[in-house]
Image (cartoon, rainbow, N blue to C red):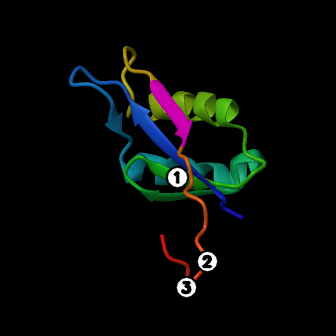
Amino acid sequence: MFARKIRVEYSSPQGPKPCPLKWLDNFAMRNFTNASEFDDTLPVSDGLIEIGTNVGLDEMCKAMQHWFRTKGYLGQGSELTVSERETPPARLSGSRS
């Protein structure tokens, strides 16, 4: 269900920083009942959220940025970046490299 690993960062004067787990969890829980398109989201750690295949990255980025600004987490000058991490190919047990 949560097949995609997504990196979520925000811009700061010191450079990109991972969004705190608190922010990601707040977005996911708020959307659990209010926005069904984001039901397939699972915050894992700072800057990392796992999502289902039906969740659109652009839509999620816009919704997260709006929610983070509404909650006061993200300042007006900061931007959110959402990117899909490459998942390494699965290895068969017993195979050697």
Q: Position of residue 38 (x, y in %)?
A: 69, 48
Q: Where is residue 50 in the image (x, y as percent from the top left)?
A: 57, 56
Q: Residue 88 carries which label?
A: none
Mark 1–mark 3 CB contact (< 8 Å): no
Mark 2–mark 3 CB contact (< 8 Å): yes
Q: What residue type is labelled 3?
A: Gly
Q: Is mark 2 on a helix, strand or loop?
A: loop
Question: From what the image shows, is residue 9 above or below residue 3?
Answer: above
* Label 3 neighbour load within 10 Å: few <14, some 14-19, many 20+: few
Q: What residue type is labelled 1?
A: Ile
Report which residue position mark 3 lands on. Answer: 94
Separation of residues labelled 2 and 1 (CA atoms): 26 Å
Tell me where the magenta segment starts and ends, as one range: 80-84
Query: Residue 61 is drawn in which quadrant?
Result: top right
Q: Which mark is residue 92?
A: 2
Q: Residue at x 76, y 46 (%)?
A: 37
Q: Is mark 3 on a helix, strand or loop?
A: loop
